[in-house]
Amino acid sequence: MLWTQDHCENGDCMRSDGARAAERRRPGRPTYPRVLMSVTVLLLVGYTVGLLVGDPGTFDPLMDGWLCIATELAAVALCVSASVRSGFAEPQVLLGTGAIVTYSAGDAYYAASLDGAAALTYASVADVAYLAFYPLMLGALGVVMVRKLKGLAWPLLLDSIVGALGAASLMALILAPVLRTGTAGGTPFEVIVAVVYPLLDLLLITAVGGVLASRGLDIGPRWPLLVAGLIIFSAADVAYALGMEDYSVGSIIDVGWVAGIVAIAAWVDGAANPARASHRTTHGVPELAAPVVSTATALAVLVVGSQLRIPVLAVVFAACTLALAAVPLAFRNRMLVTLARTDELTGLPNRRALIADVPVRLLAGRTGALFLLDLDRFKHVNDALGHDVGDALLVQVGKRFAARLQPGDMLARLGGDEFAVFLEGVTEEQAVATAQSLAAELADPVELGAATLQVSASVGIALTPEHGTDMSLLMRKADIAMFCAKSERSGHHVYDASDDDDGALRLRTVQELRVALAEDQFELHYQPKVRLSDGEVTGVEALVRWNHPTRGLLLPVAFLPLAEEAGLMPALSTIVLQRAVRRVARWRAEGLDVSVAVNMSGSCILACLPHEIARLLEAHGVPSSCIMLEITEDVLMSSPTGTSAILAELRSTGVQIAIDDFGTGYSSLAYLRDLPVDELKLDRSFVTAMKDDQRAVGLVGSIIDLAHSLGLRVVAEGVEDERSRDELLARDCDFAQGFLIAGPLPAGAVSPWLSERRVGAGRA
């Protein structure tokens, strides 16, 4: 995926599956794998037909010798071509090829050693080759397991062992007559041939079943051919074991071996095309099929053994199957318990683990402290940079918190950006020190790829036994303390009894805010902005007020922080924008050419904002130059890349951008060169300080000069006297706002005020 993305960014995107498939079908591409496959299948069909129509039990050198060997050599050629196509870089293809080559060499040696006999009655080099076939095939499957299973290898291996033992118990039961014959007078070789080969076949089949039963794992695009080939191969081995004394070369059993080899070779050929395999849908048997079938088989063997006399080996295999089948149940139960108590993203204990473990510690009666930690402005990160970056940030924050805590302390993630810490055996002073330590851990910026984020946290602290010994009570009080810490911007807050009233008021206010949004209880006041050089009014700033049903007209400071915390700012900003644009349209209809500035929270700077503003301006016939968005510099700095891109898109349409409360944030002046802004609004604290501090006068002058050098206008806020106005004018400040000019005016009072001001200017 990363390779695709990098190349697409350079204009060289990967072609679609259909395009690649079409290219593979072009006449210029080699088709020898298909030719080899077709030749192999035709030889197998010819060999099968020859054996069926021929004289059974009579050795035919052409049919039973040369045609058999030719079919297997064609399978060998198919596997070798697969190894060449894969560049000898696919271990499963190489091992599979080795297995086919080894087995075919054994068959060739066997045929050459017959010397007119119907079958060999002694062990030979051919048996060494036959036996070598099995570890090579197991190795090919093992490569798939190691490559694709990673940490899940043990569960698969256990399922495979359980399946193998179940198959072995069934095989021992089926081959009971052979075992009894071998025990009674058969040679060791005869017993080995009768039992070992079928058991090895069943081990291969079980390993394949274990792979297929594991979700997300497959053994190649032609896995059904592999399974079918091994089953046919195993059936031939079982038939041979049961009728070993009557076997002769040229019997129908030989077809089973050769057909199994051809099917396995076809699987090897398919496994040499990993690119094609990666784009297909994996089809496997249900995950629990292998252990369920194996367990059922073992139970059936034991049931038969309770009624009939069966080999002890079959009973042993069946008992081992049941014993090992119980092991995954224990592991799965333990895994489920762990998953239920662990946060999936950070790996920390979750809310369930916190609620289960802390009450046990509270029973000891020792002192302790419960922290609730909430990241400040975390929603800005998700909105501006995406949830992937937000998740990565949470992981890093969890690691930093864990590094500051002691082994006996408990750290949990409750959900979202909220964490919890429980400290046992600490005093209030120690709890506060730990809270400060956690805050200090976030002092350094967090590096997440190309993004550098500065984060902070608000910590609410509830102490035990002072504030209670009940978990739910401590959680509630720590939550109230956290809200206090966030509203006070103090970093941490220890719960106090007086916080309950404030917490209840805050919760009630949030609920009333939701009602106010639904019932449109807000109105806008507008504060004029004048050009200092000639006193001309160039625009107004929209300031929201809440007409509370019982508390009267509320200023923004009484409800905006709560709206931000509750995630209500986007809805409120939409209302403010809509009203401001409608008011500008009305003023323009009255012949008043003024712009309106709207304050925007960081949580409102979303990718959809340019489209929404454009639609709103078009609906009311207002040019984009009549709208200005004011953004505080801390919002710009918290996520400069995402926010700047959105603001740059807005600015390209003609919407003006201003940095509000400039000088109160933590940004570097160097950022001003790259930020998409038109105007700086100098915070009122600078203007107020100019009255008594010449250094403040010099600082204001320096900021104005710097802004002008970057092509930015400067607006001074909080101008309340003529001396401040004159100082600003002397230093070439562009605009001013403040009570010297006018305070915030209701919408209906703006037009009369402007008319009166213009009349006064005309008389002057």
Image (cartoon, rainbow, N blue to C red):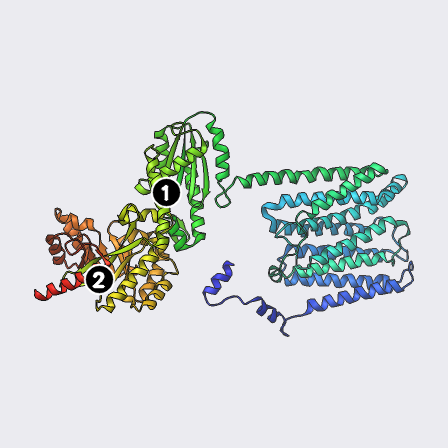
Residue at the left extreme, as displayed: 764
Residue at the top extreme, as displayed: 365
Position above or below: 33 against 312: below
Answer whether residue 734 is visible to the viewer in this image: no
Residue 46 image-quadrant placement: bottom right
Residue 367 is labelled as none
**For the image shown, how many numbered marks are present on the structure?**
2
Position above or below: 306 against 650: above
Residue drawn at the location 77% of the way across and 53% of the way down: 231
Q: Position of residue 469 (x, y in %)?
A: 43, 29
Residue 539 is labelled as 2
Judging from the image, what secondary structure is the residue with disc 1 in? Answer: helix
Could you tell me the amino acid type at mark 2? Gly
Judging from the image, what secondary structure is the residue with disc 2 in? Answer: strand
Q: Position of residue 193 (x, y in %)?
A: 83, 47
Q: How crowded is mark 1: few (under 14 residues within 10 Å), some or many (20 or more)?
A: some
Q: Earlier in the sequence, mark 2 or mark 1?
A: 1
Locate the C terminus and report the quarter of the image it occupies.
bottom left
Tag 1 residue: 507
Distance of mark 2 from mark 1, alpha carbons?
A: 37 Å
